Amino acid sequence: MTPAARKELPEGWRWVRLGDVCEVNSTRDSNLNRKDTEPTTFVPMSAVDELRGAIARPEVKAFSEVKKGYTFFKEGDVLFAKITPCMQNGKHAIASQLIDGIGFGSTEFHVVRPGPDVMSSWVHCYLRQPDVLIVATAHFAGAVGQQRVPESFLASLEIPLPPLPEQARITAVLCDRLTAVERARAAAEAQLQAAKALPAAYVRQSLAGSRNLMALSDCLIEVSRGIGSTWSQYRVLGATRAGLALAKERVGKHPERYKLVDAGTIFYNPMRILLGSIAMVDEGDETGITSPDYVVLKTKQGVLHPRWFYYWLRSPEGDCFIKTLTRGAVRERMLFRRLAEASIELPPWSAQTEAAAKLTPVRTAAETMAQQLAAINALPAALLRPAFSGEL
């Protein structure tokens, strides 16, 4: 942070540059006296997703495999992810549980080695602050592609530094609270994933009985007509891997060509269908319009239930079905014509409606759980900010 961002600190605290109280990416020799065949701790880049507190599951490799071309660190060093998406998600950790207190890892980590005036836990918690991450990200405003936080940013970062006993007291409180938040986050994520798995289970259950092979041309109606001059009365919707969402792009040059999507309408991005960009406007959802480039369709009443078909398309069975239909020399896509030419095995209408009735509360529950998870993910910021201004 810049001096302009400084806050008044409690008595006994002071502002310091991180590089003045820590070594950032130390190049000193490891002075290892080990045989090449001896095991040592290795942290690959893939482990960045697990870096939220301390390294709990390090890989073990022979020393000869990791002694060259990797980042060297010691017990108590703070690992800070260089790549901005990882950095923004709080992928930082204190190196711990290392064989003989030493380890090697991916070069995509900065290694911050605290000096005698600062604790590892203090540096680690401070670097997790949203304010710090926002400042780091600002370095790459307008940049294209994957960016990395430079070593100079960390070395010049100004941090508040209380006496060691105060650091120990504050970080002990923070660690207890952040651990509780992490447990709540893990539980909420597990519940959310379980809720997301239910639709596929209900679809499979509906397919367990009798089925009839049906041509989709007899089940679907394409919506190809544009909305016309009334387009401005509607919000613009898009299809993502998570389902229905507000479109990120503005309306194009010909808004009158946008297609109406109301209750019971299924639509998808034909160029991103393999990624699961499929959506449905369900009962209770606000009517909207979507891009003329999207495939928009409705199902025939009494033949194919829209909610059942939507969740079938998003199920493993539907995923396999989609992969058999996509075509394209440059990029695979699935236009309505390809979809209509195919056939699928359909359960009776009664089985479809029974499954569809179960899917509505599941969707509501998943949305509620997602909101709860978002609230839990916001808690660390609320805990960290006051801690570094002496308010904890």
Image: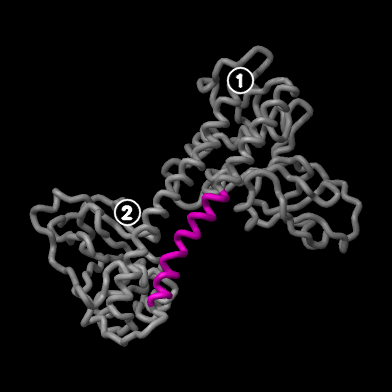
Vertical position of residue 1 compared to residue 332: above or below:
above
Query: In the displayed structure, would residue 96 be above or below residue 131?
Result: below
At a point 66% along the width and 43% down the height, the residue shown is 53
- Circle 1 crowding by C-alpha within 10 Å: few under 14, some 14–19, many from 20: some
N-term-proximal mark, 1 vs 2: 2
How are the colours assigned in the image? one colour
Q: Does the image show residue 209? A: yes
Queried whether the magenta region covers residue 32, the answer comes back as no
Q: Is residue 190 magenta?
A: yes
On the image, the x and y values in percent for residue 135 come to 51, 34
Q: Amino acid at mark 1?
A: Gly
Residue 245 is labelled as 2
Q: Which mark is residue 390?
A: 1
Magenta stretch secondary structure, dominant:
helix
Asked where in the image residue 271 lies, by quadrant, the reply is bottom left
Q: Residue at x 27, y 77 (%)?
A: 349
**Which residue lies at the image location 44% right of the left edge and 50% below the top edge?**
370
Asked whether the residues under the numbered discs 1 and 2 touch, taking CB atoms below 8 Å apart as contact, a structural biologist would say no
Determine whether, in the image, residue 31 is placed left or right of residue 26: right
Image position of 383 (left or right of 94): left
Q: Is residue 290 left or right of residue 90?
A: left
**Which amino acid type is marked by label 2?**
Ala
Q: Which residues are magenta?
A: 186-206
Residue 320, percent across and down? 42, 78
